[in-house]
Amino acid sequence: MSDNSAVKPVKIKEYNWKDVNPLIVGMESLFDLVRLVDPQECREISVNNDNGMISYGNKCYSVWNADHRCSNCTSLLACRTLKKKDRLEFFDGNKYQIQSVPLIINLADGTRYSCNMEMINIAPVSDDPQNMGNDKDSIETAGYLSTHDTLTGVLNGDGFCQTARELMSFYPDENWLIISVDIQNFKLVNSLFGIEKGDEILVEAGAVFSELSGRKGCTGRFGGDRFAILIPYRADIEEILIEGIKKIKSLIDGATYRLTLHAGIYQVNTQDLAISIMFDRAHMALQTIRTNREKVIAWFDESMLQNALHEQEVISNFEDNLRSGQFVIYLQPQINLDNRIIGAECLVRWILPDGQMVPPYEFIGILEKSDLIASLDRYVWELAIEQLDSWKDSEFADLYLSINVSPLDFYHINIASTIIDLCDKYNVPYEKLHVEITETAVADETLDNNEIIEYMQNKGFTIEIDDFGKGSSSLSLLKDLRSDVLKIDMGFLRKTRNNERGTIILSSVIDMAKNLGMGVITEGVETKIQLDSLVNLGCTVFQGYYFSKPVPVKDFEKMVRDNKMADNKQKQI
Ligand code: C2E
Ligand code: MG
Ligand code: MG
């Protein structure tokens, strides 16, 4: 049972692998039996003192001489609910008082491994005759339903993990592949073609993958549209997978919608890993191509694991790092036609304790995948507003600051009231703040973002559409949205091969913005030639390395002073 790909950290007790065996020894004086189990695979496990990894032992139920799993296993319940469970089970003339506690073990290779510790007391049932036979939780036949998916007839998640482990133990010399397959946008299939068609596709997928996994392998459905396949290694695996996928795709032959499936493959190189961790790895590979229409299959490689571990680390240490002041703002000046600095964009920087600086693209995306981005943004907005507060009555009092809003913030917090409350807290006028919102946020019709934007405009904030032109809906969104400023990134022009066409587009966008009563800021200005041509096209505010990179606040203040001095000199001449 793994926690490897989980984005939300689970608040259950964590132990370093070295501490686990001493803990068990300590508990053994209090109970008849203390053991670690992986309830999903229904296996006893142990921490190997030599390599700090997990070894798999007997089936859990072998301890009560049973030949099948308990259908309402105490540990499975504890692991599903992430809570300690304390229950009485009866079997074979004995009464078992089972306490099961979920925990995470930090293994030697950095994997966070979720499992359960069971503490069991055993007594003959005759000790307590009134309980005999009338306990609902007594062990009963597991049955087909607990291991199979009723719709497709393939195994369910638990069934897959158990069967895959059994097959691997039965054929120890095979090289194994674990494959994760998932249908993109399956919800859309249901709403476009109906639930019956959706079911037909899932059933066909189950049949195709079962045929593919063959006699030595197995297939499972992990809920929804996620399938898992265990199959002995074969060189032509990609071809047969693509054949199978084609068969499933042929069920929808519409002109308006094309079924897209992706597969991630993990080649098993050690059996000392939980099946679900192996499946996570296959799925991790799949996620690298999820949005790619051309690439259907991706193989797991270790670098993906490093990325996942890195993401986990960024997420789990984020709140502490934020509190300890590791996130700061850098300012990048915005310049007008008179070459005067009129304001700046606040860009977050993560400064590690050793002084190393981490750029936003290395952590913003990770924080956006969890719900932490809103905490970061709120923090950065407050830094910006504090800065404006400290500039009151100073030589910097006429400057504005521009803050970034992630499209994901709209889901997590009330942006308008958060920013307004912060401005009120420091008594900073709303006009001093520019708010940069990306196109994607504005284009998302499921949210009432336009209303929020209009509300903020009416309060006096300047609203800017950041990175205009990078998204796909740029022009259509201007129809309904009244932003104050379009912020065009030169980067998107740099990527086009044809400069002349780029300039025509830029010129039209600037004209259009003006006709709609909007201002234009061009960012990413790197050369004098670019600046001159932007001035000719009618652009009036600029930002980019040609003037300055984003710099610490103190350096920015010095820049503003120098800029004013130069300006004064100019005037004197
Ligand atoms: P952005 O808001 O479009 O910010 C402009 C980015 O372009 C900045 O990168 C800036 O350093 C870079 N840049 C400025 N001038 C030039 C130039 O002349 N040439 C080139 N090649 N690049 C230039 P940075 O600081 O790495 O930020 C990247 C992105 O990260 C930002 O894009 C923004 O989307 C995001 N970001 C930064 N700070 C925050 C924040 O506090 N909150 C959120 N949600 N996102 C942020
Ligand atoms: Mg920006
Ligand atoms: Mg931008």
Image: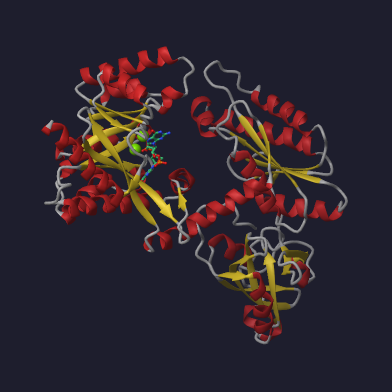
- Count of labels shown? 0
The front one of 546 and 177 is: 546
* In the image, residue 43 above or below residue 130: above
Residue shown at 71%/69% (left/top)? 47
The front one of 483 and 522 is: 522
Query: Where does the image place residue 433, in percent across and percent down from the top left?
Result: 21, 42
Q: Quadrant of the C terminus?
A: top left
Query: Where does the image place residue 434, in percent across and percent down from the top left?
Result: 24, 39
* Corner quadrant of residue 134: bottom right
> Where ligand 3 lies, by image quadrant?
top left
Q: Is there any visible trace of residue 389 in the rendered image? A: yes
* In the image, residue 325 above or below residue 121: above
452 left or right, relative to 70: left
* Corner quadrant of residue 25: bottom right
Residue shown at 28%/17% (left/top)? 537
Residue shown at 65%/58% (left/top)? 1
311 left or right, relative to 445: right
